[in-house]
Image (cartoon, rainbow, N blue to C red):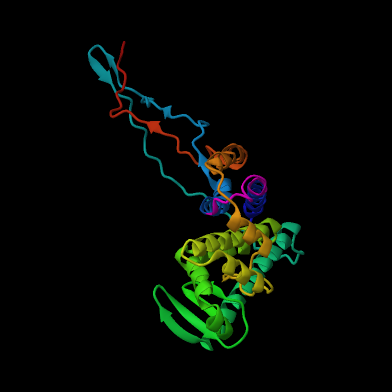
């Protein structure tokens, strides 16, 4: 509990600074794979920086030489060996008994209240995630299952937005009858690009950082990148761009129901259409990613542990040679 609060404060500051730089530098770039990997790296570095032990030379290897305190001496060719002390009876001292433990009914301290409040928030965030998982499972139980290559299609009777969950694609009966091909191509892109595992990682991090609004904004950015990437994948696989954009406008009204699902209508219409028509800017993404390296170095120097648990090497000689004194 004593180390938890400093860790949370440091990781929160790291996450906030990384995300702020991301919003300034990379948010509007069309390098969807690069920006996606960058967000994942930000989350991993945020968790790792406060516990990384840097190879800092705070403790140098120490060479220790042992010399015998009482060495045999020579007098007239005969060695004088100190006499062994007489053995004396060792009497163990009487250890007084420990005083009886006094149970105190004092009120919990402020750190304890903060700790219990934090655990309560983690539990609530976990229950919300579990409720979303149960909702998806209950929805799929009533759906008609159609196995396809690489995924399973679930067709429901209710009017819900199309979404993918793991290796499942969920469509309403109306979408299946009228817009099956573009919607399946889009949701299949989410499955083939493993977007579900990104969301799973971020939802686990959100349980730990439930109090930090930055993690919610970061998840929103990640879902937008997923939609941009799936749109690009769909258009490169033969779907007509004009008809596809009209479908996005038609399906653009709706809510995001499940945290771990990639919904077709999740991202804003204008952003998706702008990103479809935007051209990549050469190799600009590479040097923009390099701007994160100075910030990474500063955070490592500020919060990384330096030489705290580094072992001290002790070099012992193979043999202990006692010095000989001639009298």
Residue 20, image x, y percentages = 67, 48
Q: Nearer the viewer, residue 115 or 26?
A: 26
Q: Is residue 95 visible in the rendered structure shown here?
A: no
Write the residue at 66% across / 59% down: 271
Residue 178, image x, y percentages = 55, 81
Q: Nearer the viewer, residue 202 or 82?
A: 202
Residue 202, image x, y percentages = 58, 61
- Up-down relation of residue 130 to residue 141 (above or below): above
Q: Is residue 164 visible in the rendered structure shown here?
A: yes
Write the residue at 61% across / 39% down: 295
- Up-down relation of residue 135 to residue 86 (above or below): below
**Which quadrant, please, contains the C terminus?**
top left
| Residue 22 covered by magenta stretch | yes
Q: Which quadrant of the figure has residue 205?
A: bottom right
Q: Nearer the viewer, residue 314 or 288?
A: 288
What span is in magenta? Answer: 20-32
**Which quadrant, please, contains the N terminus?**
bottom right
Write the residue at 72% across / 60% down: 114
Q: Which quadrant of the figure has residue 320?
A: top left
Q: Nearer the viewer, residue 284 or 37?
A: 284
- Up-down relation of residue 214 to residue 124 (above or below): above
| Residue 235 covered by magenta stretch | no
Q: Is residue 287 left or right of residue 269?
A: left
Write the residue at 35% across / 30% down: 316
Residue 147, image x, y percentages = 41, 81
How many marks can you see? 0
């Amino acid at each position: 509990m004593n180390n938890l609060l400093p860790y949370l404060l440091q990781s929160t500051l790291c996450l906030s600074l990384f995300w702020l730089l991301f919003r300034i530098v990379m948010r509007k770039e069309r390098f969807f794979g690069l920006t996606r990997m960058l967000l994942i790296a930000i989350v991993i570095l945020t968790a790792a920086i406060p516990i990384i032990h840097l190879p800092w030379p705070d403790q140098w290897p120490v060479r220790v030489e042992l010399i015998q305190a009482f060495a045999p001496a020579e007098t007239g060719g005969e060695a004088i060996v100190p006499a062994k002390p007489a053995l004396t009876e060792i009497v163990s001292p009487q250890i007084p008994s420990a005083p009886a433990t006094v149970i105190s009914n004092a009120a919990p301290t402020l750190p304890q209240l903060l700790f219990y409040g934090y655990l309560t928030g983690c539990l609530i965030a976990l229950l919300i995630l579990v409720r979303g998982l149960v909702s998806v499972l209950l929805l799929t139980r009533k759906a008609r299952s159609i196995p396809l290559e690489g995924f399973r299609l679930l067709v429901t009777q209710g009017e819900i937005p199309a979404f993918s969950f793991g290796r499942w694609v969920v469509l309403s009966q109306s979408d299946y009858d009228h817009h099956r091909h573009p919607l399946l191509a889009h949701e299949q892109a989410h499955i083939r690009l493993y977007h579900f595992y990104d969301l799973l990682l971020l939802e686990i991090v959100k349980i730990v950082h439930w109090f930090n609004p930055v993690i919610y904004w970061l998840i929103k950015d990640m879902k937008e990148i997923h939609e941009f990437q799936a749109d690009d994948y769909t258009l490169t696989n033969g779907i007509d761009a004009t008809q596809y954009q009209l479908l996005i406008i038609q399906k653009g009204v709706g809510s995001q129901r499940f945290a771990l699902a990639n919904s077709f209508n999740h991202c804003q219409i204008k952003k998706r259409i702008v990103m479809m028509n935007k051209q990549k800017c050469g190799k600009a993404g590479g040097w923009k990613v390099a701007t994160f390296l100075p910030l990474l170095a500063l955070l490592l120097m500020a919060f990384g542990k330096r030489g705290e648990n580094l072992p001290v090497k002790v070099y012992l000689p193979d043999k202990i040679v006692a010095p000989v004194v001639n009298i």
